[in-house]
């Protein structure tokens, strides 16, 4: 088959199906839908496909395009960097990356000050988990190898991260056996409370106590870390009650277990605070980050730890933290991050995320009153979500054969919003640059699309 021309959508779509693995995607469904979105250009909150259709990007690519699309400033910073020095060497570092590490120490919460750089979120979590375990080993706790993660979370797709959490949308059953170090607990989610709680606070308290119970059951001397996202995006913007993370922090400290925050989505402004850690008022021992640090203009991730953790690796050769990736600390990524963070600061995007988030939340409340299929609305900043249900009382979801998510995806797309709706949650996470008017357009379209889906369902 010849290489398809860039202006031949039909041939491009066929070639995707013939020559690419499109991750986590049902290839048959993709073929039925006529192939994937073929993006050609993007500006602000909009993406335009090869056929000239323009969409609001309702999920910021994949929750990464914080500074919005079409930022020549970032592209130019990467270009300038690459034409001067475009690589890192074994045991080396470049000035730009060193400056970025210092910048992160300045903006990261609490005592987080030492960064290991990598290329993305899965690698960041791998690095955080390895750092935690090696830290315990350096302190003589060789037995601490288990990791407690929370159902409904997603922490990555690599061999070491894929079994963490357990989001039903990302089944892992192909990759048996489940590693012996993975322990799974619940997480606070009052709308779907499983703890018999009578208030959100009680739900939070019981979820935190479940972690303590797991630590005791497994044996504290075998537990390395607890990992979690401060606010859960996969569950559709579930914000834990304010008592939850402080309790988890205390429990971790009580048993010498490290707390890792996965801020791959929540970091760099999305919640209306610089980090999720700032929102929940708890500083982890290690924080994984990726996506928003460069707004996805260059693949960068990392793990930032306290000096206390880093000190465990100082000393003779036996202390070395044996971990690396070839492209760690790439100066092109550092240049992208600097230019991106400069935009986030200059344009007040963290505050904008907070305000626009409130605007969306207000509209979602109105939609909840109006649409029978809306079971719950929730979120903070620019991680907002709608959970749609068949029955509001029982909170039962539509059978997957009904295809409500595909209907909603289609109705949104027809009206100019790009969000591929998973299962029964509509995630809403536009770029942090979204204006008040654009927010109105986005929520109006969501409202209309919900109405159209209800009509198709005969609700
Ligand atoms: C919370 C969280 N952690 C980790 C990851 C994995 O990141 P990546 O896909 O860059 O490896 C993701 C990806 O969506 C994520 O949302």
Image (cartoon, rainbow, N blue to C red):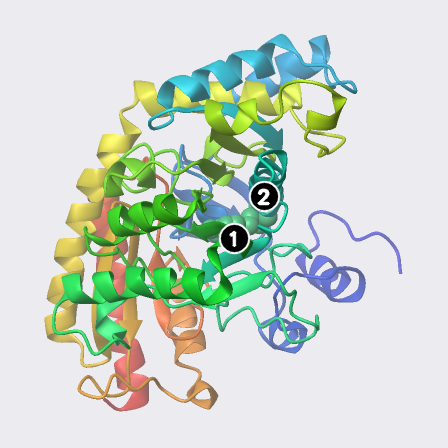
What residue would you read off at disc 2? 141
310 displayed left or right of 160: left
Secondary structure under tag 1 reads: helix
Expressed as whole percent of the image width and height from the top left, the position of residue 87 reads: 74, 19
Q: Quadrant of residue 399?
A: bottom left
Residue 255 visible (yes or no): yes
159 displayed left or right of 54: right
Q: CA distance from mark 1 to mark 2?
A: 7 Å
* 436 or 374, nearer to the observer: 374
Q: Is residue 344 above or below residue 415?
A: above
Secondary structure under tag 2 reads: loop
Q: Is residue 109 above or below residue 161?
A: above
Expressed as whole percent of the image width and height from the top left, the position of residue 372 reads: 18, 81
Question: CB atoms at circles 1 and 2 under 8 Å apart?
Answer: yes
Task: Identify the disc placed on residue 221.
Answer: 1
Residue neighbourhood size for the residue with mark 2, other residues' Cα within 10 Å, grouped as few (<14), some (14–19), many (≥20): some
193 displayed left or right of 214: left
Q: Is residue 67 above or below residue 79?
A: below
Expressed as whole percent of the image width and height from the top left, the position of residue 177 reads: 70, 72
Task: Identify the disc placed on residue 177.
Answer: none
């Amino acid at each position: 088959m010849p290489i398809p021309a860039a202006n031949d959508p039909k041939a491009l779509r066929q070639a995707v199906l013939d020559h690419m693995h499109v991750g986590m995607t049902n290839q048959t469904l993709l073929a039925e839908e006529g192939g994937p979105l073929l993006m050609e250009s993007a500006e602000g909150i909009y993406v335009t496909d090869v056929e000239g259709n323009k969409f609001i990007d309702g999920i910021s690519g994949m929750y990464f395009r914080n500074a919005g699309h079409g930022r020549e400033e970032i592209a130019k910073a990467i270009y300038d960097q690459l034409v001067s020095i475009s690589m890192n060497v074994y045991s080396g570092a470049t000035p730009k990356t060193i400056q970025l590490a210092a910048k992160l120490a300045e903006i990261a919460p609490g005592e987080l000050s030492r960064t290991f750089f990598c290329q993305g979120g899965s690698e960041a979590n791998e690095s955080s988990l390895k750092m935690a375990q090696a830290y315990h080993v350096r302190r003589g706790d060789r037995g601490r190898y288990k990791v407690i993660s929370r159902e409904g979370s997603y922490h990555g797709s690599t061999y070491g991260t894929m079994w963490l959490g357990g989001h039903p949308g990302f089944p892992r059953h192909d990759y048996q056996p489940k590693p012996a170090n993975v322990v799974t607990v619940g997480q606070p989610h009052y709308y779907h409370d499983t703890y018999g709680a009578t208030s959100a606070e009680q739900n939070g308290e019981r979820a935190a106590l479940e972690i303590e119970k797991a630590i005791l059951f497994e044996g504290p001397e075998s537990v390395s870390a607890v990992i979690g996202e401060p606010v859960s995006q996969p569950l559709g913007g579930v914000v834990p009650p304010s008592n939850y993370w402080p309790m988890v922090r205390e429990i971790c400290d009580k048993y010498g277990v490290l707390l890792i925050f996965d801020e791959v989505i929540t970091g760099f402004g999305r919640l209306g605070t610089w980090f999720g850690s700032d929102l929940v008022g708890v500083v982890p021992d290690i924080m994984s980050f990726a996506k928003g640090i460069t707004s996805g203009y260059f693949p960068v991730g990392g793990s930032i730890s306290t000096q206390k953790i880093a000190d465990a690796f100082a000393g003779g050769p036996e202390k070395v933290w044996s971990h690396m990736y070839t492209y760690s600390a790439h100066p092109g990524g550092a240049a992208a991050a600097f230019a991106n963070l400069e935009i986030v600061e200059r344009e007040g995007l963290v505050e904008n995320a907070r305000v626009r988030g409130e605007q969306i939340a207000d509209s979602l409340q109105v939609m909840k009153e109006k649409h029978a299929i809306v079971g719950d609305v929730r979120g903070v900043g620019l991680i907002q979500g709608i959970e749609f249900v068949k029955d509001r009382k029982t909170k039962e979801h539509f059978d997957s054969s009904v295809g409500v998510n595909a209907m909603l995806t289609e109705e949104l797309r027809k009206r100019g919003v790009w969000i591929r709706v998973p299962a029964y949650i509509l995630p809403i996470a536009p770029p942090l640059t979204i204006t008040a008017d654009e927010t109105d357009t986005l929520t109006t379209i969501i409202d209309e699309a919900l109405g159209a889906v209800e009509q198709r369902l005969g609700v």
